[in-house]
Amino acid sequence: MASKTKAAQLARHWRYIAEVAGCFAISFGLEQLAGRFNNSAYDLMSERSQVSWQPQSVVVGVDEKTFEQSGGPEARRPILAQALEDLRAAEPKAVALDIILHDPSRHPEDDQRLEDALRATPNLVMPCDRLPSGEWEDPLPRFAPSDPRRLGHVEWATDRLDAVTRQIPLEEVAQHQQRWALSLVALSVALGQPIVTATDSSDIFVGNLTIPAPKGVPGRPLLIRYLRDRIPVVSVLDIAKNRDLIRGKVVFLGETAQTAARDRLQNPYGETLSGVEAHAQAFETLAHGDFLTFARDYAVFLVSLAIAAWAGLIFALLSGWQAYVLDGLLLLFASYLLPVFLFHQGIVFAYIEPAAAAWLCSIGAAAYQHLYVRRQLERTESERSRYQQAIHWAAHEMRTPLTAIQGSSEIMSRYKLPEAKGKELSDMINSESKRLSRIIQTFLDVERLADGQMELKREPFEAADLVETCLKRVTPLAERKQIEMTLESAVEGTVLGDRELMAYAFYNLLTNAVKYSPPHTHVRVYGDAQDDQLRLSVKDEGIGMDHKELKNIFRKFYRTKRAEASGEVGTGIGLSIVEQIVTHHGGRIEVTSEPGKGSCFTIVMRAHVSA
Ligand code: ADP
């Protein structure tokens, strides 16, 4: 019995663990949703912890006004040449150009002037782009820097889900040629230090600066920490007026005109900016050296798993307000404290995975425990009402024999009775007290069977023996009603089980057949053993039952109107015990019956039948 409860407990634990694990799996299955939520959480945290350091760069833009005054986009080359000439006087630390000069102009003199301006600009970084065809789009050879390390690519990584630019690839490879980002090259030129990588490190080094750039991730992306007070933007027309602002800074020179700029980006704060500004922002992040890095996938997985386990444990070990308070703290930790704390430490931790694990697993665990407690309560309720019913039945049944015993004993003590009468009364006391003890025994058996306390013995016994014993026991009853009892076919087979209980069950069927049959009828017993299956039938020619009655006869305390009218006293409990015994042995009971014609009860059991 103890092992049975233990097994049930273990099964419950496994079901609970499986449910919490299922919730965890669902939380990790929300990939698409996760992307969007993680982006939003990132944007929110970026905005809350905006950086505001002193910019080291200036954006010099070819804006609308410049195009208006200088002849439109057609005049790009002379505009650029003029800007470079003006910049030289302002003495910037370096100039990074964000306009790719890959076609010759229709005016060769413009190209010549620009070429001269480029050659005369110290610390110049030229842009290149990776075409969708997978080739590099470089400046014309006349504009290209003599040192190929002065070429920087102008790619950025725009999120495919919401088109926000949160990162740029630091490294791009096309046609087996690797190029660094324009901003990184500009930093290297400004610092006068080369860009260095090491085979045993995933970082990139520029002088003293260490830039985390995981090798395994394509493009080795850098998360841009956008400056709150934007980097100063100066029109190319106003360079001369802003010499002080430009001096000693790194200039990013490109188009800021809304109409002409092909590249307009959106940052996490929801602001729109030109591509050249984005490169300057990436440069600021690099120059300041305050980096954000993504937490590794396995770390996210392990932390979320721990959170799920924690939620499961809370509801497994605690209940009531304590569980909810502790779970509330866990939810706060997983969906707020953990990501915010790590963000401040420079680690971007996936938001949705741990939060979803915490919420889903908490809901799953709480719901499971809630349902379990409710089920327990319902079971206790039904057990209580069943027990009450049984008590009522016992009290009711005991009243009749008790009254008889009481009455008889009173008569015996009060009057001097003739010997024959005295014997009759003492016989009655004897038989009624036996009946009392039977009622108590039945009551206890019902309780113990319902509780699962009744241990079934597992011993082999011959079915023929069982039938014979029961027939012998029931014969006096049958004879009293002049009912003939015959064994119609030989019973074969060895049954494994509790002989006592099986005898109780079969005897019950026999006594019912006698009880509910009129005198001078015939009760037949059949045995049929086939393929390890034994069928024991008791067929009578009694009052029978209709379809509706048949459905209820295994219910406790149920008696048919027909049976009550027949004058037979019964308890309505015998068949419910018979059914329990037979099913506990892995068997079943089949019944056929017809009102007024008789019934046939068959016990179907597994048995060993020798060939
Ligand atoms: P009891 O016989 O003590 O009332 P049982 O649980 O053995 O209780 O049987 C339940 C009811 O099923 C009986 O009261 C009777 O109405 C019906 N029943 C059982 N056996 C037969 C039978 N052989 N013929 C007709 N009715 C029967």
Image (cartoon, helix red, strand yellow):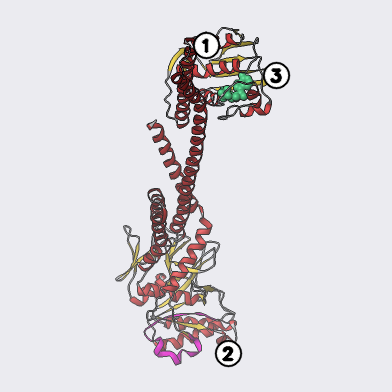
Crowd band around label 3 with a 10 angstrom C-alpha radius: few (<14), some (14–19), many (20+)? some
- Coordinates of residue 206 in the picture (x, y in percent): 33, 70
- Coordinates of residue 145 in the picture (x, y in percent): 43, 74
- Coordinates of residue 232 in the picture (x, y in percent): 45, 84
Judge by depth and name the residue closer to the eye, 222 or 555: 555
For residue 545, side relative to residue 268 (left or right): right
Which residue is at a point 43% across and 86% down the rendered structure image?
87
Q: Is label 2 in a helix, a strand or a loop? A: helix
Residue type, numbered disc 3: Gly
Look at the picture and state if 251 lies above or below 461. Answer: below
Report if residue 294 is visible in the image. no
How far apart are the two marked residues, 3 and 1, measured between alpha carbons? 26 Å
Q: Which of labels 3 and 2 is toward the front?
A: 3
Residue type, numbered disc 1: Val
Magenta stretch: give its range. 234-256
Judge by depth and name the residue closer to the eye, 27 or 222: 27
Q: For the N terminus, give its image quadrant.
A: top left
247 in magenta: yes
Q: Which mark is residue 142?
A: none
Return the residue at label 2. 69
Crowd band around label 2 with a 10 angstrom C-alpha radius: few (<14), some (14–19), many (20+)? few
Give the mark, 2 or 1, whose residue is nearer the N terminus: 2
Which residue is at a point 33% across and 76% down the rendered structure image?
191
474 in magenta: no
Look at the picture and state if 136 lies above or below 524. Answer: below
How far apart are the two marked residues, 2 and 1, measured between alpha carbons? 118 Å
Return the residue at label 3. 596
For residue 513, side relative to residue 206 (left or right): right
Asked whether mark 1 lies closer than 8 Å to ligand 1, one says no
Give the mark, 3 or 1, whose residue is nearer the N terminus: 1
Return the residue at label 1. 467
For residue 176, side relative to residue 575 (left or right): left
